[in-house]
Amino acid sequence: MPLNFLAIAAVSSGTGPAGVIVLGSELIAPALFLCLVYFAGRVITSDWPHLLAAGVLGSSVGQLLIRHFATPDISPGLLLALGAFPVICYVAVTAWMFRRALADGRDR
């Protein structure tokens, strides 16, 4: 899924009539991929598919955020925040999954 979002970010220009279609697809794609990852997560991680979907989608949407908000005149703090967003999503969801797995007392 991250490669799909990278491809969406690479081809989106955001200008003209085609920009409206691309922007619309950038809004629909996360919802569609959320459903796909959630249902796949029910098979892979049956106890927490919502966490898997949130982690994958959060880190992938970060690519679209960078595409739209990173400009040559962006402040270093905002650029750091944009770059840290996917990492924070990944770390937060992974920590939450480990916490739940340890609380269950089961090895999975």
Image (cartoon, helix red, strand yellow):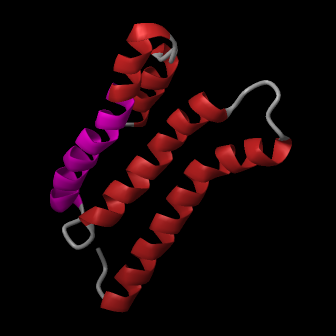
Q: Quadrant of the N terminus?
A: top left
Q: Residue at x 44, y 82 (%)?
A: 99
Res 49 → quadrant:
bottom left
- Residue 34 within the segment the image draws in magenta: yes
Between residues 30 and 84, which one lies in front from this camera angle?
Answer: 30
- Position of 20 compared to 73: left or right? left
Q: Taking 70 as reference, is 59 left or right? A: left
Q: Position of residue 85 (x, y in %)?
A: 60, 51
Left or right of residue 37: residue 14 = right
In which quadrant will I find the C terminus?
bottom left
In x, y percent, where is residue 45?
Answer: 24, 64
The residue depicted at 70 percent of the width and 50 percent of the height is 81
Above or below — where is 60 with respect to 93? Answer: above
The image position of residue 84, as x and y in percent, is 66, 51
Q: Where does the image place residue 24, in percent across and percent down from the top left?
A: 34, 27
Residue 13 vs 39, above or below: the answer is above
The overriding secondary structure of the stretch rendered in magenta is helix
Q: Which residues are magenta?
A: 25-44
Q: Is residue 25 above or below residue 48?
A: above
Q: In percent of the image, x 17 and y 61: which residue is there?
A: 42
In the foreground, 98 or 16: 16
Is residue 49 in the magenta section? no
For residue 2, say whether it is visible.
yes
Residue 89 falls left or right of residue 29 = right
Residue 4 appearing in the image: no
Q: What residue is at 40 percent from the left and 9 percent from the top?
A: 17
Count of numbered badges drawn on the protein:
0
